[in-house]
Image (cartoon, grey):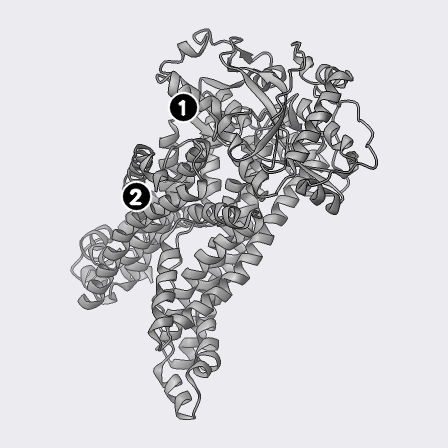
Amino acid sequence: MRMRRMAVLAIASALALSACGKDSEEDEGGAAAPAPSAATGVTLEGSPTFDKMTAAGKVVIGVKEDQPNLGFKDPTTGEYSGFDISVAKYIASKLGFGEDKIEFTAIPSANRETAIQGGQIDYYVGTYSITDKRKEQVSFAGPYFIAGQDLLVRKDDTSITGPDSLDGKTVCSVTGSTPLQRIREEYAGAKTIEFQKYSQCVEQMLAGQVDAITTDDAILLGYAAQQPDELKVVGAPFSEEKYGVGLAKDDKVLRDKINDILEEMETSGEWQRAYDATLGQSGSTATPPALERY
Amino acid sequence: MSTVLYDAAGPRAKSRYRLYGLLTTVLVAAALAYVVWKLQQTGQFSGRKWSIFQYEQVQRTLLSGLGNTLKAAATGAVLALAFGIVFAFARLSDRAWVRVPAGLVVELFRALPVVVMIFLIYYGTLANAGSASTFWSVVAALTVYNGSVLAEVFRAGLEAVPRGQSEAAYAIGLRKSQVLRMILLPQAVRAMLPAIISQVVVLLKDTALGFLITYRELLTEARQLASAQRFEFPTIPVALVVGAVYIAICLALSLFATWLERRNRERGRRRTAGKAVQMGAGEPDAGA
Amino acid sequence: METLTDNWDLFIEAFRTTVVLLIISGAIALVAGTLLGAMRVSPVPALRAAGTVYVTLLRNTPLTFVFFFVAFGFPRLDIRFSYFAFAVIALSSYTSAFVCEAVRSGINTVPLGQAEAARAIGMTFGQTLREVVLPQALRNAVPPLMSVIIALAKNTTIASGFGVMEAGAIGATLNERGYPAFDAMIWVAVGFIIVVLPLSLTQRRLERKVVRSR
């Protein structure tokens, strides 16, 4: 009965949109990375995207909003945090856009190419694997991180030890993602389910509707870190995913510039600091990968 | 209307009806109790789950989602009305080269799912113009679909106006466009208003398909909040609140339509002494 | 064109799911909707009220929301089915409300004398409805019912957002396989015209027949 009264109270307080709203809550993970200061007097000859950014006076960056430690939007503060966000902010600052000039837009996996092509965003930093197929539609700077495909399962599930033990199990991933295609093609015994977002997969797994979630270990570790008593990562990566910064296909000038910026981030130690403050929180270590310029 | 189906109940029927009524009440009450018990048992009333609504940012997110829903619905409704009127006139044209293509367009758009139309418009403008707006893709899809349905509603309405009206108008020397615009349309719209509003409800409900192309309307925002791991996935609390908002808005519109319909019928009865015009196409469309 | 020919099996499989979804949900919705219609004209106030509340709630809710509530809400309540079954539940519970309205409007078209005569020879409400009113009402309700079924056929596409691989999901899948999404959607649109056209034509024929038989 007390619970019910609390629920009613919660509705009432939600509906009474007065100043009674809480501002935020003590942060639990996803610590903010050091904010770099914006460069001044940056010019880029022949980059249509940069011209558009300068004209608008802001940069619109496509990110994920539901991946703890990578790209995560805190629903209680509206703030974005994570390693991808740190990289995105660093690039923006070196292009001359301070934090107040950044507009983050959450774009799910299936809509990434269209959002870049459609000019909805200037560039995309959100666990975006560099693949040849995608290179036909967009271009990539980086990689700035290397992850591997893995499996997230319920803590008490011992039957799944790797992709070979997925026979008859239901595996969830997002619409338009490479990991799911790989499972379908190479491990045909598994049943696959698609949702728009990984967080929806996590929701469905904890509710008992699916048995495993597959995607890159970096993403999965973030979810496991949020609920360590209920979730675990299997820990047997079976692919190599190179995360790149997605941008318009014809904008080589901006691509080269972002590659320069990423290189600077890695040599200056900024990369490592950003990593330790975000992904490093879930106990893993990593070194910056070599850039692939093209 | 339904009273013709059964006589005034006698003593035995009365007691039987009372039994049925009791049974129904018990069944419904049992179902409701089961739902509440299920909610309680699975911890849906936990303070943690509901506490997400306390945050100002969450309230702002939901309000901005509601704003986007209403914005898309309002823009879509205005454009769909214009589309409907234009194509209804076109289908009633005397010239075959206007009438036939207009008919094809209306039939085609009515046959396609709004889901497919949203994707087609979004991907299509992207491929051809190089850029696309999620807002306008949603609005355009809602406009052509509901506009086509409304075109048929208007056409039926225009055709249902008593023939004497247009004959009299022609007799005093009005042109066809004038007859349509000045004589038939005002009468048809009044009679069709309930059907038009029902269609606006359909349109409003269909804005929820914006999630397909990441247009941030109410349901898209709600689903994002529902998967908040830190709040133990408050799916049910969020669904209850957002569902109530949708039902309240749509119900208000629907009730308005019913009220208009009743008023029309009463007026019609008074005016034409029982010979109210029966509108064929007033059947509301079962949209998404 | 090669977007279609290269992925022929995907198109067939997806549209097959769409049609199966349509048939199962349609059948359930027709039965449930007719029962609801009977409830709404019954002499028992509680039955009428229950039917009215159900229809009012479902008709004023976006179908996407119903899907969300079923596919994401039910598992939270420990109610577990396959996503296909969830889609059937969402589609048929939503559509049954519209079927109910079509049936009710059909009942309204049956001349008063029919029910009066049935009562005069001593039929109960159930008999009147079953033997006299419903058979005529359903015939008149066929055109609006066909509209409801056509709407259902189109509404199945929403299931693609909730774990069911059907025609609505083709675009995203082919986009990932590297085919232009716009071409894929054009073929999906063509597919829907093929599915919906026979339904529309049947509807028009029946409409004419009903009008003539009146």
**How far from the left and from the top, in percent, is residue A191?**
38, 21
**How far from the left and from the top, in percent, is residue B141?**
48, 53
Q: Residue at x 60, y 29 (%)?
A: A140
Residue B106 or A114: which is nearer the viewer? A114
Query: Hey, which quadrant is residue C184 in on the image?
Result: top left
Residue type beneath disc 2? Gly
Asked whether, in this view, residue A91 is left or right of residue C120, the answer is: right
Neighbor class of circle 1 (other Cα within 10 Å; few <14, some 14-19, many 20+) is many
Query: Hey, which quadrant is residue B228 in on the image?
Result: top right
Residue type beneath disc 1? Thr
Is residue A31 among what the camera can see? no
Q: Is residue C3 above or below residue A178?
A: below
In terms of secondary structure, where does tag 1 sit? Answer: strand
Asked whether, in this view, residue C79 is left or right of residue A134, the answer is: left
Query: Which residue is situated farthest in the left direction here?
Result: C121
Residue C77 or A49: which is nearer the viewer? A49
Residue A283 or B277: which is nearer the viewer? A283
Front of the two marks 1 and 2: 1
In terms of secondary structure, where does tag 2 sit? Answer: helix
**How far from the left and from the top, in percent, is residue B208?**
51, 45
Residue position for label 2 = C26
Question: Same chain for marks 1 and 2?
Answer: no
Query: Which residue is situated farthest in the bottom direction here?
Result: B172
Chain identifier of the residue bearing label 1 in the image:
A
Residue A105 or A143: which is nearer the viewer? A143
Query: Hey, which quadrant is residue B5 in on the image?
Result: bottom left
Q: What label sits on residue A192 in the rendered view?
A: 1
Is residue A243 among what the camera can see? yes
**How far from the left and from the top, in percent, is residue A55?**
74, 47
Q: Distance from label 1 to label 2 (Cα)? A: 26 Å
* Image quarter hosting the N terminus of chain A: top right
Q: Residue at x 60, y 33 (%)?
A: B225
